[in-house]
Amino acid sequence: MSRAKLPRPTDAELAILRVLWDRGASTVREVHETLQDGSGYTTVLKTMQIMTEKGLVMRDEAQRAHVYSARVPRENTQRQLVTDLVDRVFGGSPARLALQALSTKKTSPEELAELRQLLDSLEKESES
Amino acid sequence: MSRAKLPRPTDAELAILRVLWDRGASTVREVHETLQDGSGYTTVLKTMQIMTEKGLVMRDEAQRAHVYSARVPRENTQRQLVTDLVDRVFGGSPARLALQALSTKKTSPEELAELRQLLDSLEKESES
DNA sequence: CGCGAACTACGAAGACCTTCGTTGACATCT
DNA sequence: AGATGTCAACGAAGGTCTTCGTAGTTCGCG
C-alpha cells in the first residue's frame, strides 16, 4: 500500500492547492481569505477535509486551527494534468499542445529563451 | 437558442467529439463502435443527445439513424482547454505549460522543427 | 463562571455526470 | 401478418462535486 494513485484534482481542489503551493502551509481561514471567490468558509473547510481523505493535502492538528499543506508537489500535478490533456485532446503529442499553448498568448523573451534552450537539448538528444 | 458560451466538455463528451472530429459526421452506432470502451449503446446515445442540447454537436434527423457532427471545431476546443489549464494551473503562462509538456515525452524532429519555427516568429514579433 | 468568537465535524441538499433498462416506433424478412 | 432487429426517447439510479446550515468544542475575556 505504499501509494494509491492520486485522483485528478477537481477545480475547487486545484484552486486550494494553488494557494497552498504559493503560501505554503496554511490554515483554512488563510486559504479562504486568499481565495477571493464567493465561497463560504465551511465550503473551503469541507473541501480541504475531503482533500485530506484523498491524500491531496496533509493536516497538522497540533494547533486548534489545523494547518494544511499540499502533499502533492506542484510539478507533479502539472505533469499529471498535462499528460492527461495530451492524451485526451492532442492524440498523445505534447508538441501539439505546446504549439497550441504558444499560439494563444504572448510570451516573454525570457520564456522564449528558456524554450529555445529546451528545444536545443531535445534536438541534441534525438541526434544521439 | 445557441448558447453564448460553450461549456467545457466532460471526459465522455470529449471522447465522442474526438470520434466525430476524426470520422466526420457519424451515427450513434458508428461512434459507439469506434469507441472501444465498455460503454453501452444507450449510454453513448444519451450522451450525444445531451451534447446536442448543450450545442456541442448537431444532429441531422433526415434518416432514421440520426447523423451527428461536431459543432465545435477541434482547434477551438483545444484552445479552450489549453487556456483553461494555463489559467488554472500555470499561473497564466502558456510558456510554462509548453515547457512542462515538452519535458514529459519525446518529440519527433519534425515537431521540434515546427516549434523552432514558431519560436522564431514569436521572437521576431516581440522585437518589433 | 458565562459569553462570544473561532474552529471542526457532520449531514444534507442540489447540480451534474455516467450508466443502463425499458418502451415504443419503424423497418425488414419470411 | 408476424417475428426479429434497429433505433430514439425517456426516466431513474448511483456516483461525484460543491455548497452551506447547524451543532458541538475550545479559547479568551470580562
Image (spheres, coloured by chain):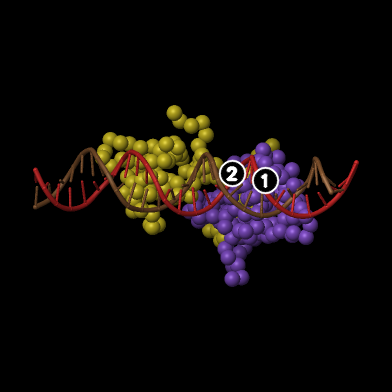
Chain colours: A purple, B yellow, C brown, D red
Q: Which mark is residue B52?
A: none
Residues packed near mark 1 inside 10 Å, few (<14), some (14 to 19) or many (20 plus): few
Chain at tag 1: A
Residue A107 on image: x %, y %: 67, 44
Quadrant of image for the C terminus of chain A: bottom right
Q: Nearer the viewer, residue C1 or C5?
A: C1
Residue B94 on image: x %, y %: 63, 46
Q: Pick out the residue farthest to the bottom.
A: A1
Mark-to-mark CA distance, 2 and 1? 26 Å
**Where is A110 relative to B4, above or below?**
below
* Residue A13 shows up from this direction: yes
**Where is B73 relative to C29, above or below?**
above
Q: Secondary structure at mark 1?
A: helix
Question: Residue A70 appears in which quarter of the rendering?
Answer: bottom right
Q: Residue at x 67, y 41 (%)?
A: A40
Circle 1: residue type: Thr
Q: Nearer the viewer, residue B54 or B58?
A: B54
Chain at tag 2: B
* Residue A75 shows up from this direction: no
Q: Residue at x 38, y 54 (%)?
A: B39
| Tag 2 residue | B84
Residue B98 on image: x %, y %: 62, 51
Q: Nearer the viewer, mark 2 or mark 1?
A: 1
Residue A102 on image: x %, y %: 61, 45
Circle 2: residue type: Asp
Q: Residue at x 30, y 36 (%)?
A: B61
Q: Secondary structure at mark 2?
A: helix
Quadrant of image for the N terminus of chain A: bottom right
| Tag 1 residue | A42
Left/right placement of residue A93 relative to residue A17 reads left
Q: Residue at x 57, y 55 (%)?
A: A8
